[in-house]
Image (cartoon, rainbow, N blue to C red):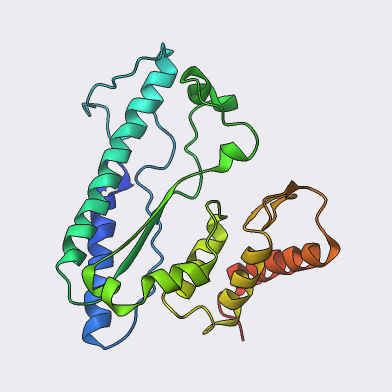
Amino acid sequence: EIAYKGRWVTDDYMAGLIEEALEESAAAGRYLFHYTTTIQNHMSYTADKYGEDYSFPPLETTAALSEEARTMLTVYAEGVRDSDAMLGRLVETFSASSEPVLLVFWGDHLPYLGDNQMAYRELGMDVDGLAGFETPYVLWTNESGAKALDWDRAVEELDLPEELSAAFLGAAVLELTGRGEENPWFRFLNTLRREAPVIQRETCLLADGTLTTDIPAELAESVAKWRQWSYYKLKYEVLP
């Protein structure tokens, strides 16, 4: 039975689905690439998000916050606690597994905390430009996974920069596990990310660290192909 917190499917329930999927794949002798999107800590961060009578832990901050900003941050922080618990559950579960497991955990965008980045500004955070699109990511592997690969060599060959568009993260992870060449789509993504590790609308961060809107013609052609191919996959799901 699906578990809800308010009207939102819980992160803990999603963790259970991941555990079940790996167990079933391992029993069948198959590899598993499980791309899971959670929803619990998505906007809106209103006081009634988890029900009218839900009691949130107090939010401690040294910043002087408006009531609206404090409410949004309080509700968001509750979701962060549950997301953290989800990651902790998966780490504990897979630490005990004999199957090699690699977890990748990230947010696809910053949370909406008011028009014009209101709560961020009240906290004194600068989220202008590309900073408004930055979220951290975590890669973790269990002991079996660490033994399965030569990680030092794999990471060196990966050319993984400090900043990377989330659209490339899945392909980079497959390459890290030695499977980046098995699918033409992921092979294309890994080639493109080495030229421009960050692509946001008409702005690219090139491999040499240059941030530009004047995209070279050959790269612009690859970016256009990436967007067209992405649309095709979203619309038709399976490539021939």
Instruction: Quarter of the image for the C terminus: give it.
Output: bottom right
Q: Quadrant of residue 76?
A: top left
Residue 2 visible? The answer is: no
Above or below for 87 versus 130: below
Instruction: Quarter of the image for the N terminus: give it.
Output: bottom left
131 horizontally vs 71: left or right:
right
Residue beneath the point at 26% across and 59% down: 15
**Measured from the top left, where is residue 9 in percent x and y?**
30, 50
Q: Nearer the viewer, residue 209 or 170?
A: 209
108 horizontally vs 28: left or right:
right
130 horizontally vs 94: left or right:
right
**Measured from the top left, where is residue 31 in percent x and y?**
34, 82
Q: Nearer the viewer, residue 158 or 33?
A: 158
70 horizontally vs 113: left or right:
left
Above or below for 165 versus 73: below
**Measured from the top left, where is residue 183 in percent x and y?**
54, 82
Q: Nearer the viewer, residue 205 or 12?
A: 205
